[in-house]
Amino acid sequence: MSDLYKIILTSGLTIFGGVFVYTFGQIISKFFIEPIHDQSRCIGEISDSLIFYANLYHNPGTGKFDDMEKASIVLRQQASLLIAKTNIIRWYSFFEFLMLVLKRSSVIEASKILIGLSNSIHKGVPSDNVDSRKKIEKLLNIITPD
């Protein structure tokens, strides 16, 4: 009877330990790793848009209206999503200290500049737009071709 008790106790503790480790891993993944990854993905999408829509914001007001409008909306949406995805990350200051995420102030500033860039698709100064792009790239550690 004592051996059976040990087998059942060992099996129960092993199952409980496995469930605990799995649950803890899921919590870490859902609350910390995935939000940081989502922010990184959003920055990647911003990088894509800076390249894809460069012809429009380098030459404000010269593209087709629908194309300019779409570019403006996409850039503004990405600025909004960048802030939203940053706000979702729990313990942001801690991860910022560990240099696992960008500085919050850099993210906020990049979002503001991105909104400004979206506003200047239809009418703006090309050199100012290029400067805005460069600032965004620096703030978000984005590498794009010139």
Image (spheres, rainbow, N blue to C red):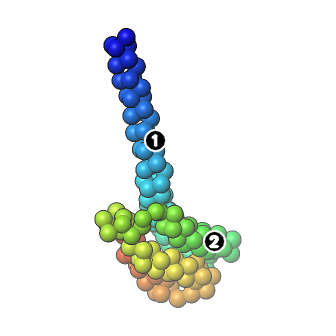
Q: CA distance from mark 2 to mark 1?
A: 40 Å
Residue matched to label 1: 23
Q: Earlier in the sequence, mark 2 or mark 1?
A: 1
Question: Do callouts 2 and 1 mark residues in contact (Cβ within 8 Å)?
Answer: no
Image vertical order of residue 12 relative to residue 140, above or below? above
Quarter that holds the C terminus: bottom left
Name the residue: 52% across, 80% down. Answer: 112
- Name the one closer to the observer, 31 or 1: 1
In the picture, measured across the screen, residue 41 lies left or right of residue 80, that is left
Image vertical order of residue 16 relative to residue 96, above or below? above
Residue 71 image-quadrant placement: bottom right
Q: Residues within 10 Å of mark 2 (few under 14, many from 20)?
A: some
- Name the one closer to the observer, 108 or 16: 16
Q: Position of residue 85 (x, y in %)?
A: 52, 64
In the picture, measured across the screen, residue 119 lies left or right of residue 99, that is right
Amino acid tagged 2: Ile
Secondary element under disc 2, as helix, strand or loop, is helix
- Looking at this view, name the residue that lies furthest to the top: 1
Q: Position of residue 59 (x, y in %)?
A: 54, 81
Q: Position of residue 84 (x, y in %)?
A: 55, 67
Residue matched to label 2: 73
- Name the one closer to the observer, 48 or 8: 8
The answer to whether residue 133 of the structure is visible from this angle is: no
Secondary element under disc 1, as helix, strand or loop, is helix
Q: Position of residue 32 (x, y in %)?
A: 44, 56
Name the residue: 40% across, 39% down. Answer: 21
Q: Which numbered tag is attached to residue 52?
A: none
The answer to whether residue 115 of the structure is visible from this angle is: yes
